């Protein structure tokens, strides 16, 4: 009998607790945003950095009254860097977690697979990292937006940097999937346009993503006639690549070396002084490139919270939450189609200046940053960027016709 | 010619590191009949422990090379006594499931303890820089990997063929009941073999740390490579692990250098060819060998 009464007590307590939470959740009902990032495996650092940016934005927004008077709540799912997993996760977020909007995607491969399912979900998605031009090009749809620089924009800027050098014979080393191949394709086309005399070598190098040992490819480029090499290897692979290239004397060769995501702060932090000086490095957002109040506040808050300077990925995720705040307040609702519509053509202030989601393809007009690696930063323990160039986002973007997007 | 020399040394460097890792997988299968999915995770733990000892505790690389594998071996004893002992008598599929669970636990623990960021370990001063060999410049550290790989190879051969411990291990692998009847403490042998396999994985991890970036997915990458090695060489075969590792090393070293367009496919083409002609691997004699 005694046992029974304890069980009854527990049931009663559980019931009360459930009622209690149901009651409060009805009264406050937070706005829920789903985050789709790589949270496990080799590239988990990208998911973590995005979460850092989002945490800063959500805390700031919630402390100042939320969106439409409601608090913001994040729910994350791990894409594992796989399109099929990401699609399933997005459906789960929308149908069982009832999120109002989505942010995320780290990989071009994932983005290509997942974006076509967005109209079915009827919720807006802001891509904060994946760079394939296709998602704001031939795969575009009215629910998909991107707040970060895409490959086409960055490679047009890269071609402008490359055209300034003396190198005429160009090759590439990039990961063997959408990102590596598209980087080379866009770079080559733009460079040819600026300078028809350049030679794009047929000997290209596409090692497996996560290859670990890049030495055979490094040797191949060193033995070739290449004068310039575009390297789109990223993340942990890039750390491996640079360390192995250092032991091979790759950077002592007479080569113009351009790293398309070389100024990612997570890579610079891991490498420290091992990142060579005098190579061209790009990033989608360099924390010291922008002199405005929002950037000052963002960089300071990030440094205070995490001790390292913010990465482009954290910045994109941070800005995406503010984009939703502005769009939801403009629409006066969290209804999916209405918020998506409000995002179209919307301009907002972000750490990297004024960001506009272009009507026609929903790609943000943001600036690629290119520079040359310089001396170590005295406090942040990473290489600085010298000769910093901030390219005009609008000028390096393809025209709507070129993107192939029909909205 | 210098290109071929460089590719050859690079293949040996990749191959012998793979050998150190894959041979542990093979010994554990050969003696315990367990396919240890968590082997790559133990390799990763070796690398992260080395990172902690060198970069955080400030120890020299050589101390980490001794201590980190011992630490991982101790953990392996715990895993064996707490979890694996329940499944030794069961079907090999059960060991796959259980060790896969252990892999997930270790992966997530590493991410929680060391974070998701990328870490690097410097090679010791003695082994930094490069030397000229076969007409090309080679990282001194790569030569060190080759030397350690060959030393371990000789040591393992001696252990299994010339020592009493090696004979006991082989006896326990062949017929555990008979070995027990001969007063061999097979429980001790089982634990010892599992710990030894983990020790080898961790040695591979410490060796890899100065040339490869540490991230929480490094174990998953190496376990796939290790499985390709044992498929090519033959599951459970000690010379097979060497042969498989060298072949895969050559596929990576020469494939990347001379056939970069298909480098992604080559390991799988190699594996498929072996499976076609020798379904048990080149040195494999079937699952009970």
Image (cartoon, coloured by chain):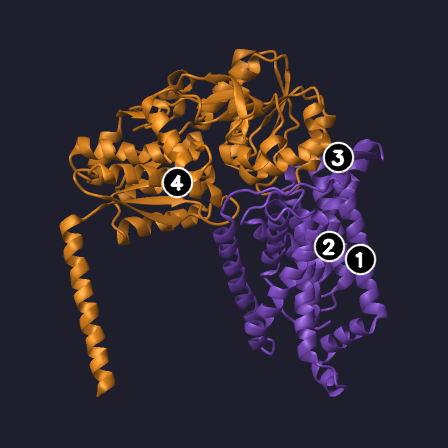
Which one is closest to the eye, mark 2 or mark 3?
Answer: 3
Neighbours of disc 4 within 10 Å: few (<14), some (14-19), many (20+): many
Element under disc 2:
helix
Element under disc 4:
helix
Element under disc 3:
loop
Neighbours of disc 3 within 10 Å: few (<14), some (14-19), many (20+): some
* Real-space CA distance between mark 1 and mark 2, rounded to the nearest whole angstrom: 9 Å
Q: Please state the horizontal and vertical placement of residue A406, each as a whole percent of the image.
A: 32, 27
Give the labeled residue for mark 2.
B19
Chain letter of the residue beneath label 2 in the structure image: B
Say if labels 1 and 3 share a chain.
yes
Q: Marks 4 and 3: CB-CB under 8 Å?
A: no
Which one is closest to the eye, mark 4 or mark 2?
Answer: 4
Chain letter of the residue beneath label 3 in the structure image: B
Q: Which chain is orange?
A: A
Which one is closest to the eye, mark 1 or mark 4?
Answer: 4
Q: Earlier in the sequence, mark 2 or mark 3?
A: 2
Give the labeled residue for mark 1.
B153
Q: Marks 1 and 3: CB-CB under 8 Å?
A: no
Q: Residue at x 70, y 59 (%)?
A: B200
Give the labeled residue for mark 4.
A52
Q: Which chain is purple?
A: B
* Real-space CA distance between mark 1 and mark 4, rounded to the nearest whole angstrom: 46 Å
Give the labeled residue for mark 3.
B129
Element under disc 1:
helix
The quadrant in which the C terminus of chain A is found is top left
């Amino acid at each position: 009998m005694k046992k029974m009464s304890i069980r009854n007590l527990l049931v009663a307590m559980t019931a009360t607790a459930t009622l209690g939470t149901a009651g409060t959740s009805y009264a406050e009902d937070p706005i829920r945003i789903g985050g789709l990032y790589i949270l496990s495996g080799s590239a988990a650092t990208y998911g973590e950095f995005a979460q850092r940016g989002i945490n800063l934005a959500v805390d700031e927004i919630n402390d100042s009254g939320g969106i439409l008077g409601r608090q913001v709540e994040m729910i994350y799912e791990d894409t594992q860097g796989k399109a099929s997993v990401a699609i399933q996760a997005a459906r789960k977020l929308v149908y069982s977690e009832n999120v109002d909007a989505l942010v995320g995607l780290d990989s071009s491969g994932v983005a290509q697979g997942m974006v076509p399912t967005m109209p079915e979900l009827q919720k807006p998605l802001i891509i904060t990292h994946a760079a394939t031009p296709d998602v704001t090009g031939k795969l575009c749809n009215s629910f998909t937006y991107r707040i970060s620089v895409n490959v086409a924009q960055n490679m047009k800027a890269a071609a402008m940097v490359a055209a300034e050098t003396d190198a005429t014979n160009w090759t590439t080393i990039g990961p063997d999937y959408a990102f590596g191949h598209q980087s080379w394709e866009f770079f080559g086309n733009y460079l040819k346009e600026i300078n028809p005399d350049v030679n794009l070598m047929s000997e290209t190098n596409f090692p497996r993503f996560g290859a670990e040992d890049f030495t055979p490819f490094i040797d191949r480029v060193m033995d070739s006639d290449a004068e310039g090499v575009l390297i789109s290897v990223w993340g942990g692979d890039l750390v491996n690549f640079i360390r192995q290239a250092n032991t091979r004397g790759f950077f002592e060769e007479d080569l113009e070396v351009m790293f398309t995501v070389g100024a990612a702060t997570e890579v610079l932090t891991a490498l420290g002084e091992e990142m060579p000086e005098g190579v061209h490095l790009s990033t989608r957002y360099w924390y010291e490139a922008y002199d405005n109040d929002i950037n000052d506040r963002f960089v300071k808050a990030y440094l205070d919270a995490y001790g390292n300077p913010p990465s482009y990925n954290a910045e994109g995720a941070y800005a995406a939450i503010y984009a939703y705040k502005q769009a939801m307040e403009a629409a006066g609702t969290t209804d999916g189609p209405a918020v998506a519509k409000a995002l179209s053509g919307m301009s907002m202030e972000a750490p990297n200046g004024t960001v506009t989601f272009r009507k026609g393809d929903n790609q943000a007009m943001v600036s690629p940053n290119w520079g040359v690696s310089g001396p170590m930063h005295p406090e942040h323990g990473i290489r600085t960027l010298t000769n910093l160039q901030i390219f005009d986002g609008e000028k390096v973007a393809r025209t709507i016709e070129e993107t192939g997007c029909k909205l | 010619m210098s290109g071929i020399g460089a590719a050859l040394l690079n293949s040996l460097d990749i191959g012998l590191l793979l050998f150190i890792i894959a041979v542990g997988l093979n010994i554990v299968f050969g003696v315990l009949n367990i396919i240890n999915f968590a082997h790559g995770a133990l390799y990763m733990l070796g690398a992260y422990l080395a990172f902690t000892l060198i970069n955080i505790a400030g120890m020299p690389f050589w101390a980490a090379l001794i201590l980190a594998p011992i630490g991982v071996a101790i953990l392996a004893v715990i895993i064996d006594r707490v979890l694996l002992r329940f499944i030794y008598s069961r079907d090999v599929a059960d060991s796959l499931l259980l060790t896969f669970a252990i892999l997930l636990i270790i992966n997530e623990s590493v991410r929680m303890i060391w974070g998701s960021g990328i870490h690097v370990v410097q090679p010791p001063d003695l082994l930094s820089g490069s030397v000229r060999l076969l007409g090309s410049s080679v990282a001194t550290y790569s030569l060190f990997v080759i030397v350690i790989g060959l030393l371990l190879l000789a040591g393992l051969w001696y252990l299994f063929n010339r020592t009493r411990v090696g004979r006991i291990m082989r006896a326990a692998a062949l017929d555990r009941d008979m070995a027990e009847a001969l007063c061999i403490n097979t429980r001790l042998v089982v634990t010892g073999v599992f710990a030894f396999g983990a020790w080898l994985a961790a040695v591979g991890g410490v060796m890899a740390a100065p040339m490869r970036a540490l991230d929480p997915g490094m174990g998953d990458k190496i376990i796939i490579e290790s499985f390709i090695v044992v498929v090519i060489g033959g599951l459970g075969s000690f010379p097979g692990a060497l042969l498989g590792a060298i072949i895969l090393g050559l596929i990576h070293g020469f494939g990347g250098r001379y056939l970069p367009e298909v480098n992604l496919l080559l390991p799988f083409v190699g594996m498929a060819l072996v499976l076609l002609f020798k379904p048990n691997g080149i040195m494999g004699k079937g699952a009970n060998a």
